[in-house]
Image (tube, helix red, strand yellow):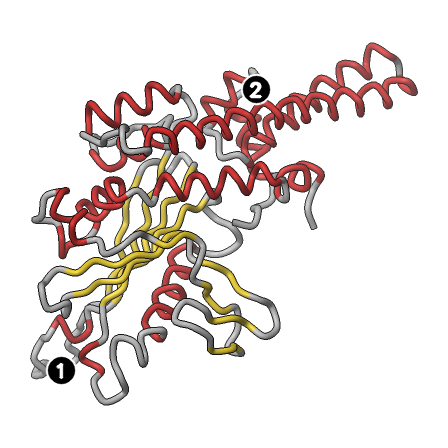
Amino acid sequence: MQTSIAASIADAPQRRQLDHQCKVVLSHKAILARILKHTVSEVAGMDTEEIIAAIEGEPLLEETPVPDTSEKIAGSNTESVSLSEGSIYYDVRFYIVLDEEGRMKILFDMEAQKDYYPGYKIVTRGIVYCARMISAQIGQEFDLEHYDDLKKVYSIWICFNPPAYIGNAISRYTMGKEDLLPGIPDEKRAYDKLEIVQICLREDLDQKDDELIRMLNILFSSRKSKEEIKRELEEDYGITMDDGYGREIDTMCNLSYMFEERGMKRGMERGMKTGMERGMKTGLERGMKTGLERGIAEVAGNLILMGKDNAFIRKATALSEEAIERLREQVPAGQK
């Protein structure tokens, strides 16, 4: 059951617009290539331009559904719909080809996750997404007499505002071979078919001198202006803004600013209204104080749901670190 804080945010069209625009910005090939270079061993030795050239076609956004249950209707190559509960969708889907024959092909799913713990472990969800990408290859990339043609899959998750004890971090989960009784040759290519990568971002904490962490924290910064974001991406990472990408960043930032202002205004108005109503019974002075406190708390709650970090919330509300952490514990994990 949603609290009033969650209900005021979760279904807002502006929230969905902002989420979609973040995926548009994330799907830019120059961004994808830099993420792959730092997380995917198969392309680690390639330069960024080579990786960009290896990305086939245009990435798909929110277009390839993952079935919720085992009951499904087989449709086109990009459609697999649950009979009972509908579909959930990958955020960004694309693939790369690393040889001229097209046999060295790797499939990718890129996810932007605003809740570090939405009621389950992210890596477990990543396994499900990888399994779906593998099973979807039957009849497309291989048939049941040629399993060796199965293509490797990656599910890469970018998680915003994890707990402070995690901070900025990158983990990779892979399949490995363990010899209980030695003798079977180690043919890594036969089993190295899926990986999950989890990237955690906290702009307000130590960047750990990591180039990818710094770039992503710039791209999705809640502290920098859109002009600063574009300038730093262009100057520090060579990501050009004259091909329309700068406009996509502008749109994302404008939606973020608008959503932030509306959330703060809504929280203050509701908090003040609640306080004034209660103050009529218990005394105007006490009611206004309560209303202000509740308004500030609701503003902080809205900012938490928008993925803002503690430093930003402290600046906006003057709440202490401890008070913000208590609010984080009270706000339920929203649906992605």
User: Residue 34: which disc?
Assistant: none
Q: Position of residue 273 (x, y in %)?
A: 80, 22
- The spot of residue 245 in percent (x, y) is 32, 34
For label 1, count other residues whose C-alpha is less than 10 Å away and answer few (under 14), some (14-19) or many (20+). Answer: few
Which residue type does callout 2 highlight?
Leu
Q: Residue at x 26, y 61 (%)?
A: 195
Q: Please report the residue visible at 60 percent of the width from the left and 68 percent of the height from the top.
A: 85
Relative to 247, say whether 100 is above or below: below
Where residue 161 sits: x, y (%)?
43, 36
Q: In percent of the image, x 9 and y 75: which residue is there?
A: 186
Q: Residue at x 39, y 33 (%)?
A: 248
- Amino acid marked by disc 1: Leu
Q: Position of residue 38 (x, y in %)?
A: 19, 45
Q: Secondary structure at mark 1?
A: loop
Left or right: 179 with respect to 252?
Answer: left
- Mark 2 secondary-structure assignment: loop
* Residue extending farthest bottom: 145
For disc 1, the marked residue is 181
Please tell me how many numbered marks the rendered image carries: 2
Mark 2–mark 1 contact, CB under 8 Å? no
* Alpha carbon distance from label 2 to label 1: 59 Å
Above or below: residue 81 compared with residue 235: below
Q: Nearer the viewer, residue 60 or 188?
A: 60
Q: Earlier in the sequence, mark 2 or mark 1?
A: 1
- Report the residue marked by disc 2: 319
Q: Which residue, as the protein is rendered here, is positioned at the far top?
A: 285
Viewer-side residue, 251 vs 193:
251
Res 305 → quadrant: top right
